[in-house]
Amino acid sequence: AQSVTQPDIHITVSEGASLELRCNYSYGATPYLFWYVQSPGQGLQLLLKYFSGDTLVQGIKGFEAEFKRSQSSFNLRKPSVHWSDAAEYFCAVGAYSGGGADGLTFGKGTHLIIQP
Amino acid sequence: DGGITQSPKYLFRKEGQNVTLSCEQNLNHDAMYWYRQDPGQGLRLIYYSQIVNDFQKGDIAEGYSVSREKKESFPLTVTSAQKNPTAFYLCASSIFGQGNSETQYFGPGTRLLVL
């Protein structure tokens, strides 16, 4: 069975500073990887995804993530954070069988706090 | 506007009562999913359906039931057998099939509280 670990429960970053959120996964085949963001009391918004090809993927809101197979990691980065980036961030891995998705396995999330 | 709607936004359940959460999508997506979110626990898969009239149990299906009679609708019933139903419930949908189309999009969620 697949699993996702987000080692940091909370991260505090100063506005304008760079950000890296860690994600490690366990999956027997080629993983399909996602980062989602959630504001309080809201649904999840897709930031970016990796299916194949270039291991550095660009997403919305200036975010990027790099897939490293050797480290089983898919870390999310942003060069300069804004106060509006404060939210909960979830990494997820997708399992597929019979040509369709069986659902996503999520990490427990990282709560990002932005200091002025 | 295309999207996923969930209703109600807040739902209250009494002891021994079954309640049903609504999820509707007009994205023409084939697959639909239900997740449960608890504080500090991330999201966990309850049920999913890849096509109409077919669905599979996820990781925490006990105490829940679903139906998929129409492509655009995937209601979730929280039965009295679910002893700890207080949580935030999220519905998602995706196009069926591997590749770039296999991305899940989420609704705004329903918060279920026990009276």
Image (tube, coloured by chain):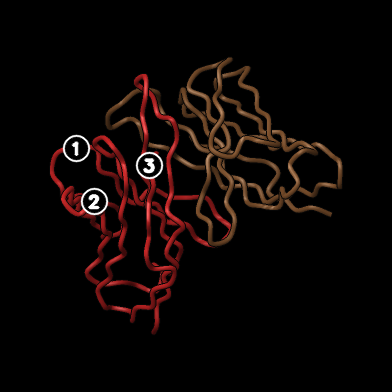
Residue located 37% across and 19% down the image: A98
Q: Position of residue B74 (x, y in %)?
A: 61, 28
For the residues bearing labels 3 and 1, Cβ distance under 8 angstroms: no
Residue located 59% across and 46% down the image: B36
For the residues bearing labels 3 and 2, Cβ distance under 8 angstroms: no
In the rendered image of the structure, the colour used to display chain B is brown
Chain letter behind tag 1: A
- Callout 3 secondary element: loop
Asked which quadrant contains residue A15, the reply is bottom left
Q: Which mark is residue A2?
A: 3
Q: Is residue A111 visible?
A: yes
Which residue is at the front of the view, A103 or B105? A103
Query: As displayed, is residue A83 above or below residue A44?
Result: below
For the residues bearing labels 1 and 2, Cβ distance under 8 angstroms: no
Q: Which mark is residue A72?
A: 2
Chain letter behind tag 3: A
Residue located 37% across and 56% down the image: A5
Q: Position of residue A86 (x, y in %)?
A: 43, 69
